[in-house]
Image (spheres, rainbow, N blue to C red):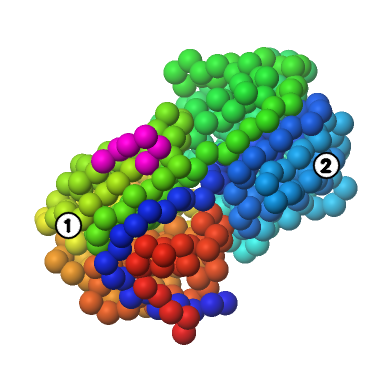
Amino acid sequence: MTSMAFHGGDVSGRISPPPSKSHSHRAFMLASMAEGRSKVDNALMSDDIISTIGACRAMGAVIDVREDCSIVDGGNLHAPAETVDVGNSGTTMRIYAGLSSMFSEKVRLDGDDSIRKRPMGPLLKALEQAGVQCGSNDGLPPVTIKGPSKGGDIRIDGGVSSQYISALLMVSPMLGTDSRIIVEGNMVSAPYLDVTTHMMGLFGADARRDGNVFHVKGGTGYTPYDYSVPADFSSAAFPLVAGALGGDVTVTNLDMDDPQGDRMIVNVLRTAGADVEVGDGSITVHRRAIKGCRIDMGSIPDLFPITAILLSTAEGDSELYGAPQLKFKESNRIETVVNMIRALGGDAEPTDEGCIIHGRPRLAGGRVVHRGDHRIMMSAAVASIVCDGPVVMDDCECCNVSFPGFPEKMAAIGLGHEVI
């Protein structure tokens, strides 16, 4: 494990974020289910995506990862013969559990210690409504899935994770009957579901959303498609906030028309008073005084840690609210974000659905325990821009989950760091 000290600094320049992790997961899974050959271009090759590629290969997809693209020969699938190890990837665990319900043989999924704390109960209960036999450790991984799912009407609580719903959606065209997925209660992280249905349509599926009800035509399967993964707004948020706090930064290769919910980082920055310019495929942020504000994080939970850092030195108080699902991410992000800000000399307090931040002119710096959570680690690194002392962390490789080479790429625009 590599320990690093981040020293902040004046940041400036241009940077291109890595490809979208969410889109990469879905692209490989959809291409694996499609009968024939697909090409996945510009995929993120992070630890989580490697877990998804391994899971897809385990059910019979042939995936040739090349330097410039990946070729996926899908179709003719079967239940994996051995336990599928998803590593640290919650997306792989949840969506692949849904895909596993198409098989009549039992499929077992497991992962690392962090994955074994991620709740699966709502998804398993939903699958059981369609006749799937599910096993778990009291709602936690490892899990077993034995189908085949008969589809039809399935009700699911939408208040914990959109990935449960994506899992049900993505398997539905592979089933013998049409499916109607009824989301009860609040539908958290809804933009990710728009990404799911949009990509399903590209691969030939008929999936429609009517309010909180999704209609998917069964028996169609998927058709091959050559897909290019867009840049990731979740990752773009780190250099953009760095620019707002410490200089002038332009993030390139962005598609503002993509259904990624985290393109809302532009609105977040503007709400906080940042100077933001949106160009053709790029966003530029200039340093300006940040003001305290209230922001609903319900549809953009992955932006919660870096938004909290943005507001940690704002003038006045801020409230981030609307995202109780943060408790069920790679860590309990409400707890880890508050602990991060406090460890750096800031003032924050947790709430049931976010946190309240009392802005201070500067932070002190200090040692942050990120619990292996990549978004906490990268947010703390950006926080060093507004710290009087260094920000020190262990296991900085965890950034490879979504932003491989983060320290080096951020160093290119002026964010200082050293290995200790």
Query: In the image, is residue 80 above or below residue 213?
Result: below
Query: In the image, is residue 244 above or below residue 165?
Result: below
* Residue at 31% from the left image edge and 71% from the top image edge: 8
Name the amino acid type tagged 2.
Val
Q: Reply yes or no: does residue 278 show up in magenta.
A: yes
Position of residue 164 in the picture relative to residue 381 (left or right): right
* Residue at 65% from the left image edge and 62% from the top image edge: 112
Majority SS type along the magenta span: loop
Quadrant placement of the N terminus:
bottom right
Circle 1 or circle 2, nearest the eye:
2
Position of residue 335 in the picture relative to residue 73 (left or right): left
Position of residue 54 in the picture relative to residue 168 (left or right): right
- State the image coordinates of residue 137 (x, y, percent, origin top left): 67, 53
Which residue is tagged 2?
62
Which residue is tagged 1?
314
Query: In the image, is residue 359 above or below residue 280?
Result: below
- State the image coordinates of residue 54 (x, y, percent, origin top left): 75, 50
Element under disc 2: strand
Position of residue 131 in the picture relative to residue 397 (left or right): right
Element under disc 1: loop
Q: Earlier in the sequence, mark 1 or mark 2?
A: 2
- State the image coordinates of residue 235 (x, y, percent, origin top left): 44, 51
Magenta span of residues: 277-282
